[in-house]
Amino acid sequence: MELVAFVVLTTLAFVSGVVVVVHRNQIVAALSLAANLVAIAGFYLLLQAQFLALLQVIVYAGAIMVLVLFVIMLLNLPDEAHRRGGGRVQGGLGLILAGAFVVLLGLAIARSGDGGFASTSGGFGTVESVGRALFTRFFYAFEAISLLLVVAMIGAVLLAKRRL
Amino acid sequence: MIDWTGILITIVKIVVVIGGLMTGVALMTLVERRVSGVIQFRWGPNRVGPFGLLQPMADGIKFLMKEEIIPRDAHRPIFILAPALSMITALAAFAVVPFGPTIELFGRPIDLVILDLDGGILFAFAATGLGVYGIVCAGWSSRSKYSLMGGLRSSAQMVSYEVALALSVVGVLAASGTLRPTVIVEQQAGWFWNWNALGGGQILGFVLFVIAGFAETNRLPFDLPEAESELVAGYHTEYSSMKFAMFFMAEYIAMFTISSLAVTLFLGGYHLGFPLPFEGLPLVALQVGTFMLKVGLFMFFFVWVRWTLPRLRYDQLMDLGWKRLFPLALANVFLTGLLVTFEVI
């Protein structure tokens, strides 16, 4: 069961990821990114982190990607179908960076060994356990992040108001 | 070891719920037109069958027989995908709504809910949140100005009101201390003053939820995405035949979902509101009936409001969402926090 789900999700995540990069149409790319985010939520579910999976769908697929789509549609960009890709420097740089990323990932996987994941206890990944962890062990980090978000929000409003 | 009986039970539950929903949707299309007739002092459809009861069937056949038109410049894959997306997300949200208590059949406890999830309320919001994609895709892929404007309006509207909708529920969640719909319903058992909207101190949350719910389902007075006088039919202008019908059904299913969520969260779910002297299957049947009656009354309220109130202007809509509902919802969260801290509820 788990293996089947994993294979399906991986295929979905991989294909949609490739489409995001390759497709010339911005809307199709954005929709594929949304599908990709949902597939990753599926991975979280497989790892028993159901709260995280639900939040991933609500926040990323349900809110952020909708805003991205909204902006793309408002800008009404011309179809990129007839435009050529970036120059030679851009391509070369992309290849190098992608290679570096693959090496980095490989190192991380090699380091982690093949012991698999630690087994989880019954309440793992539920709303309650995540909430408890946030408000006890990670209390200061949690509050610092919320402060940071408020500052960012006020900054965004200020910047937008100046141009009104 | 795979629990085949469990899977079979779940499939049966899914079939029953979808069948019930579809029947409800068919009935609602008739109820809407008949009630609008009553409100506007005219008859409404009363020719096909007794009281016009066969009208939905006639409509369904008509939709199936109509020519299916896909505009030449439309983006075909997304144009075809959009109505399906709308339907799937609308149906998925219903999975976590408990429509009855746990019953015992053939020595096996069966929950009368498809998916008894720890974060059930979040699941419903995730599904309704994804519902925007159907509308946005339809609006964009049609390559028509009216459709695009409808799609843009609706995505802005749904994203705005989702915030108020989610915040209005936080009060209930804080008071119940759980996100599991079945537990939230069980806490409202007994007399009707145990319901969250009454004794639970969530009356403000309930009103906010209903208003935001109307906006979330694109119903009047918030049906700007399909404002006929400005946008022809909004995002589904270019759709015909069964594809249009799917948008139509998705809208009604979304109404059913919001109604059932309101009943579950605020109005005691499937509980009758007073204790009964008997138990067992008769009580369960009565409770399922109560749930359907409550949801039905709520659906009637949707129709009633639609034919009573005029449509808001776009800036009024955004004002209401961000400057009125949002602060009120925050205030409700704060008040509920106080009540919970001092153990009033």
Image (spheres, coloured by chain):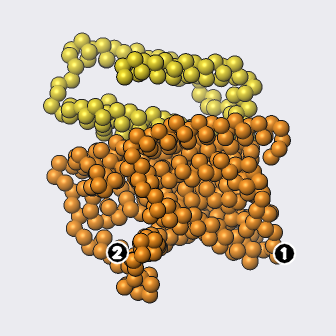
Chain colours: A yellow, B orange
Which class describes the residues within 10 Å of circle 2: few (<14), some (14-19), or many (20+)?
Answer: some
Please, which residue is most extreme toward the bottom here?
B50
Q: Position of residue B254 (x, y in %)?
A: 48, 57
Q: In the image, is residue A159 above or below residue A49?
A: above
State the separation of the CA atoms marked 1 and 2.
Answer: 45 Å
Q: Which residue is mark 2?
A: B59
**Contact (Cβ within 8 Å) of mark 1 with mark 2:** no
- Quadrant location, the N terminus of chain B: bottom right
- Judge by depth and name the residue closer to the eye, B342 or B254: B342
Q: Position of residue A12 (x, y in %)?
A: 41, 42
Amino acid type at circle 2 is Asp
Which class describes the residues within 10 Å of circle 1: few (<14), some (14-19), or many (20+)?
Answer: few
The residue under the point 42% across, 56% down is B310
The answer, for residue B207, to whether it is visible in the render is: yes
- Residue B50 shown left or right of residue B237 in the figure: right
The residue under the point 58% across, 49% down is B209
The answer, for residue B4, to whether it is visible in the render is: no
| Subunit of label 2 | B
Secondary-structure class at tag 2: helix
Residue B153: image tag: none
- Residue A13 shown left or right of residue B199 in the figure: left
Amino acid type at circle 1 is Pro
- Judge by depth and name the residue closer to the eye, B116 or B52: B52
| Subunit of label 1 | B
Q: Earlier in the sequence, mark 1 or mark 2?
A: 2
Q: Which residue is mark 1?
A: B277
- Residue B57 shown left or right of residue B184 in the figure: left
Res B101 quadrant in image: bottom right
Q: In the image, is residue B127 above or below residue A83?
A: below
The residue under the point 36% across, 36% down is A70
Secondary-structure class at tag 1: loop
